[in-house]
Image (cartoon, grey):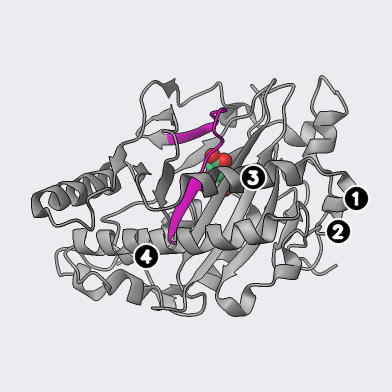
Amino acid sequence: MNILQDWPEPIVRVQSLSNSGISKIPDRYVKPPLERPSINPFSVDGNIPIIDLEGLSGEDENFRANILNQVSVACREWGFFQVLKHGVSPQLMDRAREVWREFFHLPMEAKQLYANSPKTYEGYGSRLGVEKGAILDWSDYYFLHYLPCTLKDYNKWPALPVNCREVMDEYGKQVVELCGRLMKVLSINLGLPEDRLQNAFGGENIGACLRVNFYPKCPQPDVALGLSSHSDPGGLTLLLPDDHVTGLQVRKDDNWITVKPASHAFIVNIGDQIQVLSNAIYRSVEHRVTVNPVEERVSLAFFYNPKSDIPIAPIEELVSPTRPALYTPMTFDEYRLFMRMRGPRGKLQVESRKSHK
Ligand SMILES: O=C(O)CCC(=O)C(=O)O
């Protein structure tokens, strides 16, 4: 068996398990005691910052500076924030979420046509890593590519629901545009020319992909996770959360904060590649997803990534004798192999990339 061609064990759809009416989940979904959602570190009340982007391209300089400052504080202190009035159509956001909810409610045979393999991850999947015997997360997903154009293949996007491809095509365009605007904001906030971060990503040749997460109802939510704690391996993530079921928790110091999504907001988070490029001025932050005994949940995670075959290292201007480069160069292709082999593992990977000087 080729480890990146085949899954190590037969794939079980979590949705089928959930629909079977079991009251006890199989052992392979039961997290070790210290990783269970009810255990340390504790969940506390609060929320990540919410930032209104209206005025970012306006004439009022003070207003603009204020928005830049809010983003700067959110990136430094949280690594996570929500954005409002971001330019993506609210109706399109609703349609995108609904189209995927419908997809996951299609008969299993219709979804199985797109069953994925660990080679590209494209399609309908139910596990992330390929480690045999791993404890799994309580979720199914659909993964597809937008960019580079050479990877975008509509045949790998679901033909059903009928408007899925059209809706998701437009969604991708609008979200890529928003990511480009946010990259400029981050670059300026790092004291760099506005296109510096984008150029470090490979200019026009960046990668963009979508993972739609489907978290079925879980009869034992206290011992399982929808998605284990991880930081995102890529550049920037724009998450469209479920509109009525919470579940995303963000690590803040020694606590977990359950994100309360604002209406039609995107949740933005810094990925490992921006941590590396910014020489850890910005940090990717661990997050995880809890599951629910009475409600299923859908979320769309849009990943904006560097070109996959260029070395990513701290940006020269952010390296100085007092702040030497904290990371050795590595391409994103090499980097994401870790997640593809071992599944979500907190911040283990980015921390292990530190150069030891
Ligand atoms: O479902 C969520 O709220 C978060 C999903 C996520 O973290 C991911 O897809 O990487």
Question: Residue 216: x and y, percent?
Answer: 72, 33
Q: Is residue 216 left or right of residue 22?
A: left
Give the labeled residue for mark 4: 180
In the image, what residue type sits under mark 4?
Gly
Query: Which residue is located at x 29 percent, y 41 percent?
Result: 51
Q: Which mark is residue 246?
A: none
Q: Quadrant of residue 101?
A: top right
Q: CA distance from mark 3 to mark 1?
A: 19 Å
Quadrant assignment for the C terminus: bottom left
Q: Which mark is residue 213?
A: 3
Is disc 1 in contact with disc 2, using a CB cutoff of under 8 Å? yes
Label tally: 4
Sequence order check: which comes first, mark 2 or mark 3? 2
Give the magenta range: 233-250
Query: Which residue is located at x 26 percent, y 59 percent?
Result: 185
Q: CA distance from mark 4 to mark 2?
A: 34 Å
Give the SS element for disc 3: strand
Sequence order check: which comes first, mark 4 or mark 1? 1
Q: Residue furthest left?
A: 62
In the image, what residue type sits under mark 1?
Glu
Give the SS element for disc 1: helix
* Magenta span contains residue 4: no
Q: Quadrant of residue 153?
A: bottom right
Residue 262 versus residue 340 in the image, above or below: above
The foreground one among 172 and 269 is 172
Q: Quadrant location of ligand 1? A: top right
Give the labeled residue for mark 1: 109
Sequence order check: which comes first, mark 3 or mark 1? 1
- Crowding at dot 2, Cα within 10 Å, few <14 / some 14-19 / many 20+, comes out as few
Q: CA distance from mark 4 to mark 3?
A: 24 Å
Ligand 1 under 8 Å from disc 3 Cβ: yes
